[in-house]
Image (cartoon, coloured by chain):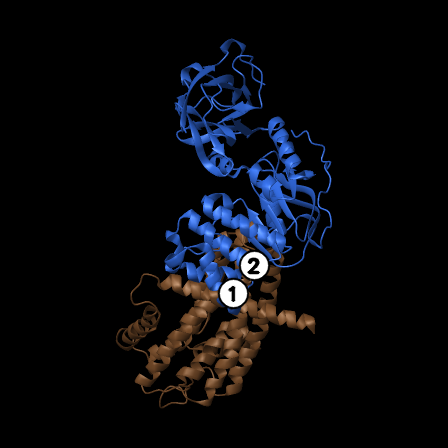
Chain colours: A blue, B brown
Amino acid sequence: MSENTGEVVGENVSENLGEVLIDAHGVSKKFASYHRRATSLKERLVRQEQTESDVFWALKGVDLQVHRGETVGLIGPNGSGKSTLLKVLSGILRPNDGQVKVTGRVSSLLELGAGFDGELTGRENIYLNAALLGVPRSVTDGLFDEIVEFSELGEFIEFPVKHYSSGMYVRLGFSVAVHIDPDILIIDEVLAVGDAAFQKKCLDRIADFQKRGKAILFVSHSAGLIEQLCNRAVLLSHGQVIFDGRPGEAVAQLNHVLGVDRVESEKGEIATVTEMNILDPVSGEAIDEFQCGASVVVQGVIDWNEPLPAGAKLSLHLTSPADKDPVIEIEPLWHFVPAGEISPGQSQFEWVIDALPDMPGDFTLNLGVYTQEILIAHGRIGGVRLQGATRRTIGGALTLEHPQTTLKRA
Amino acid sequence: MKRAMRGNVQTRLRTELISQLVRKDLKVKYQGSSLGFIWSLANPIILLAVYSFVFAFVFPNSMPQFGLFLMSGVLIWNFFTMAVSGAAGSILGNAGLVKKVPFPHSALPLASVGFAGVQVALQYLVLIAAFFVFRMPPFRPHLLLLIPALVVALTLTIGLGFFTAASTVQLRDTQHILEVVLFAWFWLTPIIYSASMVNKQIAKAGFTFPGHGLLSWAYYLNPMAGVVVAFQRALYGVVFYPGTHDLLLPSDSVFFYVKALGIGFVVALFVLVLGVRKFRRLSADFAQDL
C-alpha cells in the first residue's frame, strides 16, 4: 500500500545541538483490532483505524531525538501514528518494542480539556491539572494569578468549566501547560481551536520557550505553522519516520505521500468499497491536485457481498483532519440505491461533483454506504488538498451502473 | 540519600494529587444538593433509627441497643465496600484522564479509598454522638483496638482496591462479580449477628470432629471478621448479655481480638502484595486497554 521504503531521508538541520531530552529508539506500538459487527464500523470510520489483520502496528521502529532548544513538528496523514507517538513519548502508552528516554518534566496537551473535570470551576481545575502534572500545591499557588491572566478567563475562572467554550478550554489548558515550567512541551493539534489573538499569544509563548532552551514537539495539520515555527519536522507515514529534516521539505514530502497513498477502505460484511478514485472529468485520468471550483468525478467500485438490503443509500462528504464531522456535504446528501436493479456482485459508481468548494485546505473525501442509517461500508480518499481562493454545499449527480450481464462472482 | 529525598518528594506529590482527587469527588458528589455533606451524616442517623426500631419492636432481640451493635460494625463494612467498589471502577471511570494525561495511576484507586474514608469517618462521629445519647460513651482502653483494626481494614481495602481496579480494565465483569462477592462476604462477616454465635455453632459441631478450635480461628482468615469484632469490642463494648456470663461478643480477652486481627493482617497483607503487583503489571497498558 505504501510506497515508502522505510528509509529516512533528509538531513539533520539543527546545528549546535543541545542535550538530548527525548530519545526514542526503534519504538514500535501495536494495537489489537477487534472484528466487530457492522454497527461499530461507524465508530471505526471516526477513529480512522485500519483492520487488515488482528494486529495493527501504529508505530514501526520509530527513531526520534529531540534536543534542548529544538522545536519539532510532527506531520503525516491521518492514522500515520502521530498521536500514538506523542502518547508514547509522554508516557501514556507503553511501546511494545524499543526504548524511550525522556529527561526533564513533560507537559502535554493531547486533547481539548484533558485533565479537566466539567463540574469543577476553572480555579479548581487549575489545581487539579497541576497536581496531575506533578506540580506541588505551593508552587501552583504562586503561579495561579499568572495562569488566570494568561488564559484571559477573568471572572469565568470561578465558573464550572462545563460551561466553557472550546476556545476557553484551550486557553486554560495551554495556560496551565506553559506555566508549570516544563522542559518539554508536547502539543497535539489543540491550538487550532483558539481565536487568532490567542493563537498569536500562544505562538509568542512558544517562541519564548524556544529562547529559553525548552524542547517542543507538536502535531499540526497546518503546513504554514510548521514552516513558521519549527526548526525541524518529522514526517510519519504508516507508523514509520519517512522524513526528518527541514520543515519545508517535510511538508513537500507530506504532499507527495498524500498524493500517492490515499485510498482506504474497510471490508464490511454486506458491502465493501473496493476502489475509489478522483478523476478529471475531461481526460478521465486520476488527479492529485485539486483546484477550488474545479469539477471532478469520484469513481469507484462497490462489492455487494450479500443481496442488497432494502433502503441502501450512498452519501459523499468531505471531512477535515481536525474535525470528524463532515465539513462539506455534497448534495444531494443521500442517494438511494435501487434495490430491484442491483444484485450481489460488483457495481461501479460515478459521482460527478460540479465544483469543488471555495475552501482551501486539506480534506478527506468519504463515501459511506448506509442501510437504515447504519454505516455498512465506507471508502476514503485522504489528502485532498484544495488549492486556490464559502459555500457549505455543492451540487453533484450520481449514476450507478450495474453490469447485470457481466455479473461475475469470485 | 538523594534517591530517598526524591522518593519523599514523589510521595508528597502523590499525596497532594490524591487529596485533590478526593476533594474533586466530594465536591462533585454534593454539587447541587443544598444540604451538601449533611446527607452523609443523615445516612447513619436514619440507619440507626430504622435498625433500632426494627430490632426493638419487630424482631425483639436480647442484645442491648442492638442498633448500636449493628452500627459499630456496619460502618467499617460500608467503608470497605464503598472504597473497594469505588476503586474497582476508578480507572474505567476516569478513562478520559488515563488516556490523555500522564500521571501515576495508583492515585485513582487510592483516591476512592480516601473518598470513602472521609465519608465514613464523619459517620463514625455521628455514631459516637449516638453512643452518648444512649448513655454508652465508648471511652475505654479498648478504643486502642481501633488502631490495628484500621491498619488491617486499610491494608485489605487498598489491596483489594488495586486488584479490582486493574481487573476491571481487563474484564468489565469484575464489577458485577465483585457485587456478588461483597454480598456473600457481608453475611460471612459478623456484622448483623455476633461472632459469639458462630463460636457456639462451631463448638456444638466440635463434638463430632477434632480440631474445632482451629476452625474457630479459621473464621478470622476473613480479615473483615477480625476488624468488625474489634470495632464492636471498642465501640459497643457490651461483652456479656446483661446479667449473665453468656458471651455476646466473641471474647472477654483483649488478646483474642489482637490475635484475630493478626490473622487477618497476614491475609490482608497477602492481598495487598497481590493487588499492588497486579496493578503495577497492568497499569502501563491502561491507556491502551480502556
Q: Residue placed at 33% from the left, 77% from the top? A: B67
The answer to whether mark 1 and mark 2 are in CB contact below 8 A is yes
Tally the numbered discs.
2
Mark sitting on residue B17: 1
Which residue position holds label 2?
A: B103
In the image, is residue A323 above or below residue B148? above
Q: Residue placed at 46% from the left, 16% from the top? A: A400
In the image, is residue A180 above or below residue A375? below
Mark sitting on residue B32: none
* Residue B276 location (% of width, % of height): 59, 64
- Is the C terminus of chain A in the top left, top right, bottom left or bottom right quadrant? top right
Question: Can residue B222 be seen?
Answer: no
In the image, is residue A317 above or below residue A93? above
Amino acid residing under circle 2: Phe
* N-term-proximal mark, 1 vs 2: 1
* Residue A249 location (% of width, % of height): 66, 35
